[in-house]
Image (cartoon, coloured by chain):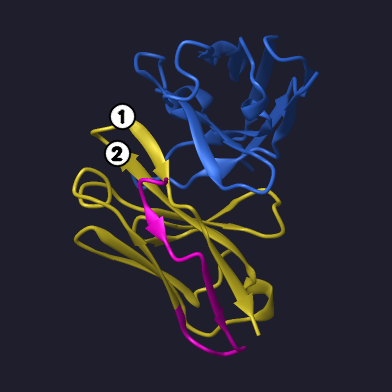
Chain colours: A blue, B yellow
């Protein structure tokens, strides 16, 4: 069974930093692209960042470019999102997501971790 | 403003056929497969359709299609448990971004 478990969310002040982690089990982690997708309270889904299976290709949403860094450690089946210079508008549930579904592969979601940016 | 456009809401009675649409452009839907997600009461999104395939565990009353730059999700016989928000998504090569629609709220009357 595919499982994605996020951790690292919490309350942080504006301008602060937070590091989210995700561990994937039940599949060959190193063979799959990974993403972070977030959902602000009462809002829709917003893609944040993408990393290819071997970390050769990385993309970011314009809203987080220059502030967030996505990385992965295939030896540990883990995905990380380093978030710096956090703003109130970054408040959201952050999901670790396997694949984008465009290559005939199903998309799997973690349970999400809440990040709240507030003073 | 989302790169993909969805109806804000759709409603129907039990057993009714409903269709949700997702309109994009040549650089996204016109090029890549579309994925549909179901989110019940702001819980964890669940994959319903990816490309032409029904996700595991999803009833076969759900189906997806695409024509040009518009994708559709059809529920052939609406059930009370189908009440949820539905999001379409795909890759956009011009933006180098995974884009989502704004979501359609399906209400069962």
Q: Is disc 1 on the same chain as disc 2?
A: yes
Which portion, as a residue range, is magenta?
Answer: B1-18
- What residue is at 63 percent from the left and 26 percent from the top? A90
Q: Is residue B73 magenta?
A: no
Tell me the SS state at disc 1: loop
Residue B96, numbered circle: 1
Image location (x, y in percent) of residue A70: 51, 16
Q: Are marks 2 and 1 in contact (CB under 8 Å)?
A: yes
Q: For mark 2, name the chain.
A: B
Quadrant hosting residue B73: bottom left
Residue drawn at x 67%, y 19% as measured from the top left = A20
Q: Secondary structure at mark 2?
A: strand
Q: Nearer the viewer, residue B96 or B77?
A: B96
Chain to which mark 1 belongs:
B
| Image height of B93 relative to A45, above or below | above
Residue A60, quarter of the rendered image: top left
**Residue underneath mark 2:** B92
Q: Count the numbered circles shown.
A: 2
Q: Is residue A109 above or below residue A83?
A: below
Q: Quadrant of the C terminus of chain A?
A: top right
Cα gap from disc 2 to disc 1, whole angstroms: 6 Å
Would you say B83 lies left or right of B73 here?
A: right
Q: Main secondary structure of the magenta part?
A: loop
Per the image, is B13 magenta? yes
Note whether A88 is above or below B71 in the view shown.
above
Q: Residue visible at 42% across and 45% down? A: B1
Where is residue A50 drawn, in percent x and y?
Answer: 44, 26
Residue occupying the far front of the picture: A119
- Residue A19 percent coordinates (x, y): 67, 13
Label placed on residue A90: none
Is B22 left, or right, of A70 in this rendering?
Answer: left
- Would residue A81 be found to the left or right of residue A16 on screen? left
């Amino acid at each position: 069974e595919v499982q994605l478990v996020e951790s690292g969310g919490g309350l942080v002040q504006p301008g602060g930093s937070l590091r989210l982690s995700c561990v994937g089990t039940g599949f060959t982690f190193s063979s799959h692209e990974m993403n972070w997708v977030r959902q602000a309270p009462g809002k829709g889904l917003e893609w944040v960042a993408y990393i290819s299976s071997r970390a050769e290709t990385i993309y970011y949403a314009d809203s987080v470019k220059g502030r967030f860094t996505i990385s992965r450690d295939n030896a540990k089946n883990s995905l990380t999102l380093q978030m710096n210079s956090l703003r109130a508008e970054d408040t959201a549930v952050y999901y670790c997501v396997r694949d984008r579904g465009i290559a005939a592969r199903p998309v799997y979601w973690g349970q999400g971790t809440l990040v709240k940016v507030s003073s | 403003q989302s790169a993909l456009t969805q109806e804000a809401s759709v409603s129907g009675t039990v057993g009714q056929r409903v269709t949700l649409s997702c309109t994009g452009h040549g650089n996204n839907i016109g090029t890549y497969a579309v994925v549909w997600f179901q989110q019940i009461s702001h819980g964890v999104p669940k994959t319903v359709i990816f490309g032409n395939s029904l996700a595991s565990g999803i009833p076969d009353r759900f189906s997806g299609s695409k024509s040009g730059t518009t994708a559709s999700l059809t529920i052939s016989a609406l059930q009370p448990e189908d009440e949820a928000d539905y999001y379409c998504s795909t890759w956009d090569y011009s933006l180098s971004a995974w884009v989502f629609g704004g979501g359609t709220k399906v209400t069962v009357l």
